[in-house]
Amino acid sequence: MADTVVLAIFAFVYLGMILGEIPGFALDRTGVALLGAIALLATERVSPESAWDAVDVPTIG
């Protein structure tokens, strides 16, 4: 069974990506994605090690 916290964060981020921003927040798509990543780390749904492994450094560079 899927974790409802993860699904809620996913829905929030996906909505932000569709709209380009979240109304009421001063966040663009990048900010929404970063907030979603922070939320997953804060709720301990993703470990810092697995989050770091998911970063594609050449793409960011």
Image (cartoon, helix red, strand yellow):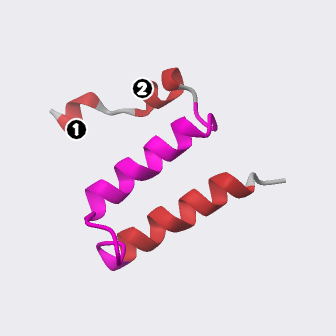
Residue kind at label 2, given as amino acid type: Trp
Q: Residues within 10 Å of mark 1 (few under 14, many from 20)?
A: few
Q: Give the residue drawn at x 35%, y 75%.
A: 24
Q: Which secondary structure lies at badge 1?
A: helix
Q: Nearer the viewer, residue 53 or 24?
A: 24
Residue kind at label 1, given as amino acid type: Thr
Seen in the picture, residue 61 relative to 2 is either above or below; the reply is: above
Residue 37 placement (x, y as % from top left): 45, 44
Name the residue beneath numbered marker 2.
52
Q: Give the residue drawn at x 64%, y 52%.
A: 6
Q: Is residue 6 left or right of residue 55?
A: right
Residue 10 placement (x, y as % from top left): 55, 60
Q: Is residue 11 left or right of residue 6?
A: left
Q: Residues within 10 Å of mark 2 (few under 14, many from 20)?
A: few
Q: Residue furthest left?
A: 61
Seen in the picture, residue 29 relative to 19 is either above or below; the reply is: above
23 inside magenta stretch = yes
Seen in the picture, residue 13 relative to 1 is either above or below; the reply is: below
Q: Give the residue drawn at x 28%, y 63%.
A: 27
Start-end of magenta stretch: 19-46
Image quadrant holding the C terminus, namely top left
Name the residue beneath numbered marker 1.
59
Q: Residue furthest right?
A: 1
21 inside magenta stretch = yes
Kindly report the distance in space between the C-alpha atoms of the residues bearing marks 2 and 1: 14 Å
2 or 1: mark nearer the eye: 2
**Mark 2 or 1 closer to N-term?**
2
Residue 49 placement (x, y as % from top left): 50, 20
Q: Which secondary structure lies at badge 2?
A: helix
Tag of residue 45: none
